Image (cartoon, grey):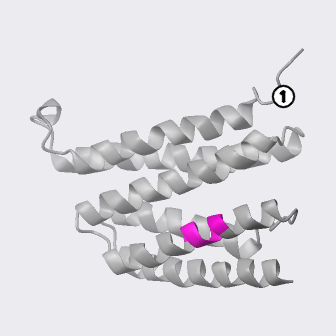
Amino acid sequence: MKNKNLNLPNFLATFRILLAPLMLWFMIDQSNPLFDGWHTTWLDYFAGLIFVIASITDFFDGYIARSWNQMTKLGGILDPLADKMLMLAGFIGLIVLDRASAFAVFLILSREFFITGLRVVAVSEGKEVASTMAGKIKTVVQMIAIGFLLMNWPFATALLWIAVALTLYSGYEYIRNYIK
């Protein structure tokens, strides 16, 4: 009998979970003797490459799960966990590198923890709090902001604050939908 949890979407989410600490390592351990002789820009590039690969798997695991009818309860846990771990690694690394406002990161992560808790309560009550379009957009904007901040590109800080606004708004939508 085939285990339905052993599928490509769940593999991609697990792969993203494994990439998150690797990306963080490149960001925060730049004085590691293993990196002697490397310019810090290259470590940023490697962290950025890992982040892009992980972000792409986020798109494909959801797309494949829906289009190939491979949605599982395990995938419903792994996918948001992988997203949160990737964002957490990115934001912690950016704070350590002094490229992101700790207050902005605090607002984003507070919302993420609160909504995760709300979803757990909803499931325990037999309710489903589905993802909203605002939630999907905030994830994309957060990913773009992290990428820009990693690369020290122009407008990175402005993108971070746009991500904060979208994050708080999508949190409001989740709360509103839960109350309904």
Foreground pick, 15 / 114: 114
Q: Nearer the viewer, residue 25 or 53?
A: 25
Q: Residue furthest top?
A: 1
Q: Which residues are magenta?
A: 112-117
Left or right relative to 59: residue 127: right
Q: Classify 100 as above or below 173.
A: above
Main SS of the magenta part reads: helix
- Toward which corner of the image does residue 88 lie, by quadrant? bottom left
* Residue that mark 1 sits on: 4
Please state the horizontal and vertical placement of residue 167, each as a whole percent of the image.
Answer: 57, 77
Q: Residues within 10 Å of mark 1 (few under 14, many from 20)?
A: few
Q: Is residue 151 visible?
A: no
Image position of 82 (left or right of 105): right
Judged from the image, the secondary structure of the residue bearing numbered disc 1 is loop
Residue 6 picture location, percent across and down: 75, 26
Quarter holding the N terminus? top right
Is residue 123 positioned above or below 47 on the image? below
| Magenta stretch contains residue 85 | no
In terms of depth relative to the viewer, which is nearer, 89 or 47? 89
- For badge 1, the amino acid type reads Lys
- Count numbered badges in the picture: 1
Residue 114 % position (x, y): 59, 72
Q: Considering the image in quadrants, where does the C terminus appear?
A: bottom right
Looking at the image, which residue is at 62% across and 43% down? 57
- Which quadrant of the structure image shows residue 94? bottom left
Q: Is residue 147 left or right of residue 84?
A: left
Give the image quarter of residue 104.
bottom left
Residue that appears at 50% across and 80% down: 164
* Residue at x 29% of width, y 43% of height: 26
Residue at horizontal 27%, vertical 69%? 99
Q: Is residue 130 above or below residue 89?
A: below
Q: Residue 172, image x and y in percent?
A: 67, 84
